[in-house]
Amino acid sequence: MSGYAVEVKNLTKRFGGLIAVNEVSMSVKPGEIFSVIGPNGAGKTTFFNLLTGINKPDSGNLLLDGRDVVGLAPEQVAARGVGRTFQNIRLFGAMTVLENVLVGRYVHIRTPYPSALARTPGCRREEKKAAERSLELLDYMGIASRAGELARNLSYGEQRRLEIARALALDPRLLLLDEPAAGMNPQETEELKKLIRALRTDMDLTVVLIEHDMSMVMSISDRIVVLQFGSVIAEGLPAEIRANTKVIEAYLGSGAAAGGGAASSDPATTESRAAAGNGATGEHHA
Amino acid sequence: MLDSLLSLLPQILFEGLLLGFVYAMIALGYTMVYGVLELINFAHSEIFMIGAVAGVEIFRSLSNIIHNGYLLLLVAIVVGGLVSGLVAIAMERFAYRPLRRRGTTNRLVPLITAVGVSFVLQDLVRLIEALWHNEFFLRMASVSDLEGSVTVLGIFIQYKSIVVIVVSLAMLAGLNLLVNKTRLGTAIRTVAQDMDTARLMGINPDRVVSSTFFIGGSLGGVAGVLFALQYTTISPYSGFLPGIKAFTAAVLGGIGNIPGAMVGGLVLGELETLAGTYLPTLTNGTIGTEYKDIIAFLVLILLLLFRPQGLLGQIVKEKV
């Protein structure tokens, strides 16, 4: 099994009078690392919520390998192999690290609850397999030694890793990462980049990520889509996005592209400055 | 006088323990549902009552067929637990779930529904019993081999009291295992902590909620059978007072907290029994035994003033 091909067609979502996502279309190829960027309030997280079934779109289609997932409940979308992490970490803090990952394995256990209560041999075997796989994933993410710890006692970086491990437990074919580098220092961001690239090949994934750290976006993405006020204003290779005047305007205001020099209007620079407040500095772009 | 009071103490503590276990088992139903849905299910007292009525009916109809009292009790416990569990599932399915579906965010709405469901269940049981037996005040049939007793360390212990304690302990231990060690228990804990994220992990919240109502309902039903066994007179309105006290126990222990419900139940059972016995003597009869119910709520009010999160609310933050 390889990563999902994601096809988004004319997706629209309104909240009252606000159009959060407006006629958005894009297509992501299997195995791509695809970034969604845009200023705050551009509709990026709403877009993820539509993809995972948390919100229902008002119109449009979402196809995973050609099968429409609009109208499916979040748990059904998850069962089809869509894993997700959150902008602000949402682990089950009062549960152990291992339990957090086990939760993701449960969709793959087929034994019904009564036999699970009776502890039948078949069910024990399944649960043992689930625990083994969960430990493998923790090991892959480098936090296996913390398996018995409560999730809320992990450090920030470890919690981010655990969230990814938990999403991977679903055996996803599409992994959605919502600002995975938020709050990370340049070195941690560098490690994260390596990890995401490794994930794509090791786990046969399509990766879609929302990110504000432009140096990371530019270096890791195969392709990028830019949202502003809920609409797509650009889509293309990193180099194309970097040179796109509409994108520069979106980030700096309309005067900048006309009057400003190329260096100061580079979205990478501004975003890095903006992100510096969170400790996410990084002017690594060439 | 003090000597005679002290010599009574072991017996009183034992009686308190019995009552406490019944409260604890009912309190678990309140606390589990609250943990998962943040709903105070006031109709849970009727689930308890239905278990008690089912127990009485089993004793009434099968005592001529099953002559072994313990076997009869086992059947009553299984049937009482199942019936209550299923009624709880139906209640959730037809009364609370439609409200959730509509996205009602006002917490008062399901609360009022719960009160309504409570009345409906009371009168439904009354109707059934009245049509069936022409009366709705029921007496638990006494079975001779459960009526024996022993005296240990000066405590008078009926065999059926031992059954009450053994069954309660087994159910509480079983619940602990279920919640902490099984897949279903883990799913319940995830939904209690964060329903949206649980769904993104592929967990169907409706199934988890149904299971929670079934588990809580069964515990309440078994508590009902044990209550009927111990206190023998049951009516469709018998659920109210034990129910509201068990709710008090759940709040006392920290609502949403499973160990808290157990501790709260035991504490309340002991307090009530102690107060009921000693207050009349200590106040020369000014405050009679009938004030024991007030004592329970007085304790709750005081506790809420000084420790609003409940006894274990702070120590164990985990819901369910």
Image (tube, helix red, strand yellow):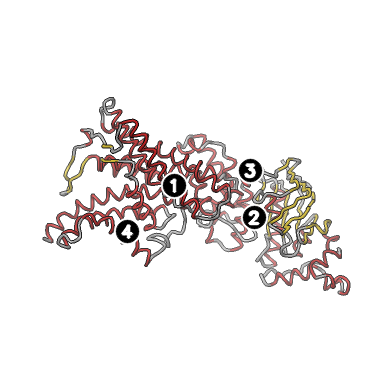
Q: Secondary structure at mark 1?
A: helix
Numbered disc in front, either 4 or 3 = 4
Quadrant containing the N terminus of chain A in the rendered view: top right
Q: Secondary structure at mark 4?
A: helix
Q: Which residue is mark 3?
A: A76
Any mark on residue A130, and which?
none
Chain that bears disc 4: B
Looking at the image, residue A264 lies above or below residue B39? below
User: How far is the residue under mark 4 from the one under mark 3?
Assistant: 46 Å
User: How far is the residue under mark 4 from the one under mark 1?
Assistant: 23 Å
Q: Work out whether mark 4 precedes mark 1 in sequence or the reverse, and give the earlier one.
A: 1
Chain that bears disc 2: A
When asked about the image quadrant of residue B147, the answer is top left
**Whether label 1 touches label 3, CB < 8 Å:** no
**Whether label 2 touches label 1, CB < 8 Å:** no
User: How far is the residue under mark 1 from the one under mark 3?
Assistant: 34 Å
User: Toward the viewer: A227 or B241?
Assistant: B241
User: How far is the residue under mark 2 from the one under mark 1?
Assistant: 41 Å
Q: Are callouts 3 and 2 both on one chain?
A: yes
Q: Which residue is mark 1?
A: B116
Chain that bears disc 3: A
- Label 4 environment density (alpha carbons within 10 Å; few <14, some 14–19, many ≥20): some
Q: Residue at x 64, y 49 (%)?
A: A168
Residue B80's spot in the image, x, y percent?
36, 37
Q: Which residue is mark 4?
A: B297
**Whether label 4 touches label 3, CB < 8 Å:** no
Q: Residue at x 15, y 58 (%)?
A: B5
Chain that bears disc 1: B
Q: Which residue is mark 2?
A: A85
- Amino acid tagged 3: Gln
Left/right placement of residue B252 relative to residue A144 reads left
Given the current orientation, which residue lies at the most extreme right position?
A: A258
